């Protein structure tokens, strides 16, 4: 009996073995289908996020990339999703100036680099977030490592395509210009970019339209502007003209207290026509004529493209260069042109206070304060005053100084603290019993006739005209 009782389960297990194998294979097949479904969902999320990014719908793109990070089954997939998420957060931060978005963008880029250490786009996103947070030194180091690893470790690191390398070198130029590097490094990166840009977008010459020189886009103009700024800064360090210009300003300040009210300066009295733009291929290192030619060319390109942000900076830095060259009339003209475009025009790169620093120091944006540019010796009003003073127009120079002092004077206490006070409760004047705003009976009757005409298509005459019909 025992043998019989034990033999039955054995035979039953033998009969059930094929069924168990079928169930196992079905389970494995279901798991494979789930993996394929997850893969399809991941790629669909990436595609949807890219479509939302192209449509500038960054909130929807962020949601898609966050879901894609959770759906990713491999490190490469999660790295791609995190990199796209970082880029989307950066795009939102550019529009909203929210430091929390910058911190999240940096975290997403670092997460992508943990999964895929040689992801060039993630490194670029991390450097962009660091620079926006005010860490220009650290951002410059990240960018140098990105560009160096692409050359020294070509077997392990993915090769940079031209577009990524161009944006990395342009970002490094910005960081170096704001204190993350030297002027020589800015000039070196500009030479590298001049070699790369024609390969990405061949230059188009517009000589047929009466414009001599190659067409420059916004990125090329920014690169040329930073290159010229570095050249002017190096020239200022190597020459004694900077001290002379500051001496002019000190000399003018001594006569401000004795200045009388004079007629305001007419801008047209100092404006000079723009010289013809020429193609310049000379190295701009310590070459004043080449710097002047490049800034003149940049002015022509920015004016033709209607990029005022580039145009006023080109005028301001050309004014500073004209002061070094003792071209007083041209310096006054360039300063006036920059001021006509921007009253805050200054020929000086200032390290901007990052949003995160403003939040940590407790500064509130509602407080009224004087812009720092008015206290700079390289503000265009100061430079124009120095040029006019050396040119012999002393009263016009004093008027510029007086105007700048008024602009640099802090507002009264009641105005500066007005933003801290709660606004007065708005009251409706109609609730005070004033009937002057109400329609007269004739106006109400005319309104009813117009409404009836729109509704029925028939116009009713006033009662006073019924008897004459």
Image (tube, rainbow, N blue to C red):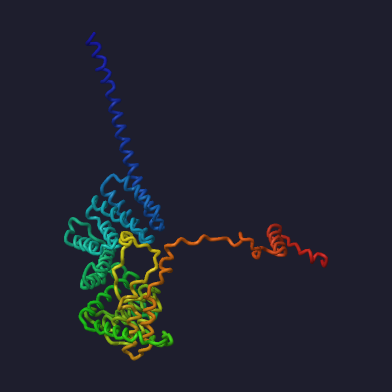
- The residue under the point 78% across, 63% down is 463
The answer to whether residue 399 is left or right of residue 171 is right
User: Between 283 and 421, which is closer to the camera in this rendering?
Assistant: 421
**Rendered location of residue 241, percent (x, y):** 24, 84
The answer to whether residue 7 is left or right of residue 368 is left
Q: Quadrant of the C terminus?
A: bottom right
Residue 380's place in the image compared with 171, above or below, is below
Residue 103's place in the image compared with 5, above or below, is below
**Rendered location of residue 323, percent (x, y):** 29, 84
Q: Residue furthest front?
A: 413
- The residue under the point 24% across, 8% down is 1
| Quarter-of-image position of residue 390 | bottom left
**Rendered location of residue 304, percent (x, y):** 39, 76
**Rendered location of residue 71, percent (x, y):** 32, 45
| Quarter-of-image position of residue 427 | bottom right
Asked if residue 138 can be seen in this view, the reply is yes
Asked if residue 275 can be seen in this view, the reply is no
Q: Residue furthest bottom?
A: 392
């Amino acid at each position: 009996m025992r043998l019989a009782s034990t033999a039955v389960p054995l035979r039953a297990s033998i009969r059930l073995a094929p069924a168990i194998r079928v169930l196992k294979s079905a389970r494995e097949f279901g798991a494979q289908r789930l993996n394929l479904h997850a893969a399809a969902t991941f790629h669909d999320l990436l595609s949807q996020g890219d479509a939302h990014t192209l449509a500038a719908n960054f909130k929807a793109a962020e949601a898609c990339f966050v879901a894609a990070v959770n759906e990713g089954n491999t490190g490469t997939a999660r790295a791609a999703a995190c990199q796209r998420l970082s880029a989307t957060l950066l795009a939102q931060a550019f529009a909203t100036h929210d430091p929390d978005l910058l911190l999240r963008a940096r975290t997403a880029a670092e997460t992508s680099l943990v999964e895929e250490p040689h992801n060039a786009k993630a490194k670029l996103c991390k450097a962009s977030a660091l620079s926006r947070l005010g860490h220009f030194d650290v951002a410059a180091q990240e960018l140098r490592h990105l560009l160096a690893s692409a050359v020294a470790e070509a077997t392990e690191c993915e090769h940079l395509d031209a577009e990524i390398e161009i944006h990395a070198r342009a970002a490094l130029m910005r960081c170096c210009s704001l204190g993350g590097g030297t002027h020589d490094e800015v000039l070196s990166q500009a030479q590298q970019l001049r070699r790369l840009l024609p390969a990405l977008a061949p230059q188009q010459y517009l000589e047929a339209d009466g414009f001599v020189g190659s067409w420059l886009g916004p990125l090329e103009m920014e690169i040329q502007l930073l290159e010229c700024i570095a050249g002017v800064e190096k020239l200022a360090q190597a020459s004694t003209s900077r001290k002379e210009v500051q001496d002019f300003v000190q000399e003018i300040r001594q006569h401000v207290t004795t200045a009388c009210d004079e007629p305001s300066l007419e801008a047209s009295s100092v404006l000079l026509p723009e010289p013809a733009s020429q193609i310049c291929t000379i190295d701009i290192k310590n070459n004043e004529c080449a710097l002047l030619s490049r800034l003149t060319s940049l002015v022509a390109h920015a004016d033709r493209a209607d990029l005022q942000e580039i145009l006023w900076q080109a005028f301001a830095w050309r004014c500073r260069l004209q002061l070094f060259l003792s071209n007083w009339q041209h310096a006054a003209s360039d300063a006036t042109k920059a001021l006509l475009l921007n009253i805050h025009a200054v020929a000086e790169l200032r390290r901007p206070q990052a949003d995160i620093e403003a939040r940590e120091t407790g500064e509130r944006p509602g407080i009224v304060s004087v812009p720092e540019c008015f206290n700079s010796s390289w503000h265009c009003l100061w430079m124009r005053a120095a040029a006019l003073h050396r040119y012999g127009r002393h009263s016009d120079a004093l008027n510029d100084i007086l105007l700048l002092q008024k602009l640099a004077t802090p507002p009264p206490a009641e105005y500066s603290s007005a933003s801290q006070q709660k606004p007065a409760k708005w009251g409706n004047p109609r609730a005070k019993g004033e009937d002057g705003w109400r329609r007269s009976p004739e106006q109400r009757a005319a309104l009813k006739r117009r409404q009836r005409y729109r509704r029925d298509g028939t116009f009713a005459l006033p009662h006073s005209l019924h008897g004459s019909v």
